[in-house]
Amino acid sequence: MTTEQGAPASQAPAACKRRTDCRLCGSRDLVEVLKLTPTPPANAFVKASERGRPQQTFPLDFFLCRACGHLQMLDVVDPAALFEDYVYVSGTSPVFVKHFEDYAESVITRFSVQPGSLAVDIGSNDGTLLKFFKNAGMKTLGIDPARAIAAQATASGIETLPVFFTERLAGELRVRRGAASVVTANNVFAHADDLKGMLAGIRTLLADDGVFVFEVSYLLDVYTKTLFDTMYHEHLAYHSVRPLRDFFNTNGMELIAAERVDSHGGSLRGTAQLAGGPRRPDPSVEGLIAEEAKLGLQTVESLKAFGAKIDGVKASLQKLLKGFKAGGKRIAGFGAPAKATTLMYHFGLGPDLIDFIVDDSPLKQGLYSPGLHIPVVPSQAILEKKPDYLLILAWNFADPIIAKQKAFSDNGGRFVVPLPEVVVKP
């Protein structure tokens, strides 16, 4: 299921398979509702020596399960190719650091988590969230297959295992470390092809009165705000509450809370416990299910209309940027998040429109963007190269980026925010 365009010589072609059943309920009653431009893996940045070689691309096709209402990708890229050399770290974003600080405080307070109890974070990245649990006196353990990032987290004081989370690993940890009072999984509960297996591992690891707390991109926000750029190969599942409630119910757990949060332009924070656990579900679960039903969120018609809306934003942005270029203006991108790969490919934003991309992460600086091979450089390049416009690819951080780049705007520079709708600031 790959579109072979000559993978870089330094990389073996990544495997890709297509499943034929819903990963939540197992039904084969699946219908394609959205087709985006195929891309390389969203974080497949390349070195200068590889920039002239085309990269392997994979389908971005999305299917609705008519049995349970779950939206998903069926094409599954080898997770080792996606995650073992990961380049995203949470700690480079002050907004995310604050988000995780508040997150940890909320979990500890709401569920009366005691000092000395164990918190395990699946897909823990650089340990930013776990640091706040550790500061509250808890034992912590991170699990993340990104080897370099896991090593850095461990060196910083947050023990992190550089492996994928499995049911077998959960059993071993339960024996060695004891049961976990808190298990978290942030922006990774949509990444696993085998969600049933992941949930089995969480059940194994969780204390009888423990909680599993997860954040995922919320389909309701993706749909209402046109956040299609959050749709890429790492994200196999596009969660909404009704299918999740039913999924937990049929897999020995219970969804007891569902909260909308602002991260990534609009996310869902879910809380679950073991079936028969001590807490009663709060009204938030059924409340969001009712909102989803009003929008027709789990219908073929609504999701196909979503595709038409994306095309409208694409036309507006292309017209704007091509007009700037025709007038001799220089355009740079700001931020090189994973979602920029989907946005740039589907909207046709290549090196003919974007001269360079600025990103604050040292892990990305000096590399070239996936497939399109636009250079990624430190923010000082804005003052050196003096672009006329900054296209904010990390648009969910537009306000703090604009505030931080006051020198650019004071010198006449302007910002383009591409989503949820095209806006030029100031």
Image (cartoon, grey):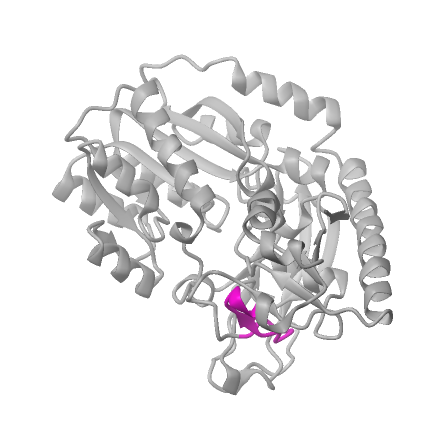
Quarter of image, res 315: bottom right
> Is 412 on the left-hand or right-hand side of 80?
right
The residue shown at (36%, 22%) is 275
Residue 65: % across, % down: 65, 40
Residue 247: % across, % down: 50, 32
Residue 309: % across, % down: 81, 45
Specify the segment rendered in magenta: 368-381
Instruction: Please state the total of marks drawn on the protein image.
Output: 0
> Is 399 on the left-hand or right-hand side of 102?
right
The residue shown at (39%, 38%) is 100
Q: Nearer the viewer, residue 173 or 229?
A: 229
**Residue 371 sits inside the magenta stretch:** yes
Residue 47 visible: yes
Give above or below for 107 relative to 330: above
**Residue 102 sits inside the magenta stretch:** no
Q: Main secondary structure of the magenta part?
A: loop
Image quarter of the N terminus: bottom right
The residue shown at (64%, 63%) is 333
Give above or below for 393 relative to 299: below
Quarter of image, res 290: top right
The residue shown at (48%, 31%) is 269
Give above or below for 247 relative to 378: above
Q: Nearer the viewer, residue 162 or 192?
A: 162
Residue 392 visible: no
Residue 279: % across, % down: 36, 14
Quarter of image, res 288: top right
Q: Residue pushed farthest front?
A: 410
> Is 99 on the left-hand or right-hand side of 160?
right
